[in-house]
Amino acid sequence: MEDLHYIFAKQKKVLFFLLALCVLGWAFTPYASIFAGLGLGAFFGTYNFWILVRRMDKFDRSVSEGRKASSLGTALRFGSGIAAVAIAMSLPEHFHLISTVIGLMLPYIFLVIERIVHLVKQH
């Protein structure tokens, strides 16, 4: 599980860089709602990834101790995704819905890219 924590630490660094770009895009471009939606989605997406890391730790501990494994928190992650979309839908003048959905998926896209880079470096 240390590898997953390392990946999450890298994800947080990328998120802070992305949020900084979103703030700059929001402040200095005419596409403020798109950048706000990306930032909102990336924030909730990273929260979902953090929940997944935390639940994977619990799952790993319970399996190694021989106890029954609990769920991986799918309902909680769906709920926070729905919350991000609800915020974007209730405030369409501030948040672009499609960019919010794209932002929700960014941590998982970064995860796939990071794994591909890791595999290429190993070979």
Image (cartoon, rainbow, N blue to C red):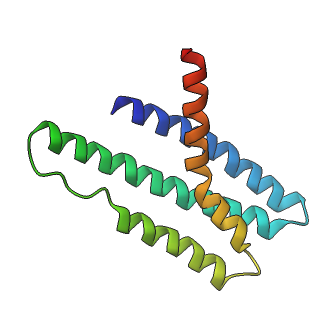
| Residue at 23% in and 40% down | 60
Q: Quadrant of residue 64?
A: top left
Residue 10 vs residue 89: left or right? left
Residue 68 or 3: which is nearer the viewer? 68
**In this rendering, is residue 118 above or below 15?**
above
| Residue at 9% in and 47% down | 67
Residue 101's x, y, as percent? 64, 66
Residue 114's x, y, as percent? 58, 33
Residue 59 vs residue 76: left or right? left
Residue 113 vs residue 8: left or right? right
Q: Quadrant of residue 14?
A: top right
**In this rendering, is residue 83 above or below 19?**
below
| Residue at 65% in and 76% down | 88
Residue 98's x, y, as percent? 71, 69
| Residue at 54% in and 57% down | 45
Image quadrant in which the C terminus is located? top right
Residue 48's x, y, as percent? 46, 57
Image quadrant in which the N terminus is located? top left
**In this rendering, is residue 13 above or below 93?**
above
Q: Residue furthest top?
A: 123
